[in-house]
Amino acid sequence: MVLECPRCKRPLAAADLGGTTVDACAGCGGTWLDRGELEAVAARPAAASETAASPFVETAVKYLPCPRCRQLMTRRQYERFSGVVLDYCGAHGVWADRGEIERVQAFLQAGGVERRARREEEERKLARSVERYGTDRGAGADTSHGWVDVALWVW
Ligand SMILES: [Zn+2]
Ligand SMILES: [Zn+2]
């Protein structure tokens, strides 16, 4: 089955990415990674490459169809704090635009997963302290503001 690029509809071609065979688009420079392939690719150090130097620029938010099932994919930030938004199909894999794999690799190299764990621990601590604050102060109007702030930050 020939997969089609979700952005420019060209057929994807098999490409080797540090030992992992992925499906790449020659048109827009994006890459389709089947489930598990992103983890394999991302674990490798980022290589200085042409695609990283000229990343894909998204001019408008667009939901892309999964090349395998054609369902629209979910846009999600890799590891929550990486700043790299990838398109995920829960059943099949993930689409990375040109330059995004390099950014994921660079994020992991810089200890991004540990940073994420630390931030989440801070969020939990803050949520606990707000709970205490909320109980101490009762349900007065001045405490509701704090609740809203935290709810937005933690989502
Ligand atoms: Zn393309
Ligand atoms: Zn799919």
Image: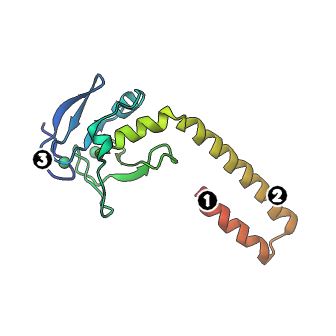
What amino acid is labelled 3 in the image?
A: Arg
Q: Amino acid at mark 1?
A: Trp
Q: Position of residue 64 (x, y in %)?
A: 27, 54
Q: In the rendered structure, which disc, 1 or 3, sits on the residue that comes first in sequence?
A: 3
Badge 3 residue CB within 8 Å of ligand 1: yes
Of label 1 and label 2, which has the lower sequence position?
Answer: 2
Tell me the SS state at disc 3.
Answer: loop
Callout 2: helix, strand or loop? Answer: helix
Q: Residues within 10 Å of mark 1 (few under 14, many from 20)?
A: few
The amino acid type, in three-letter code, at marker 2 is Arg
Which of 112/5 is in front? 112
Mark 1: secondary structure: helix
Q: Which residue is mark 3?
A: 10
Q: Between marks 1 and 3, how big is the CA–CA gap?
A: 40 Å
Q: Quadrant of residue 103?
A: top left
Q: Is the residue marked 1 within 8 Å of ligand 2, measured from its CB?
A: no
Q: Residue at x 42, y 48 (%)?
A: 84
Q: Who's the residue at 72% across and 67% down the image?
A: 146
Q: Which numbered circle lies on residue 132?
A: 2
- Residue on which disc 1 sits: 153
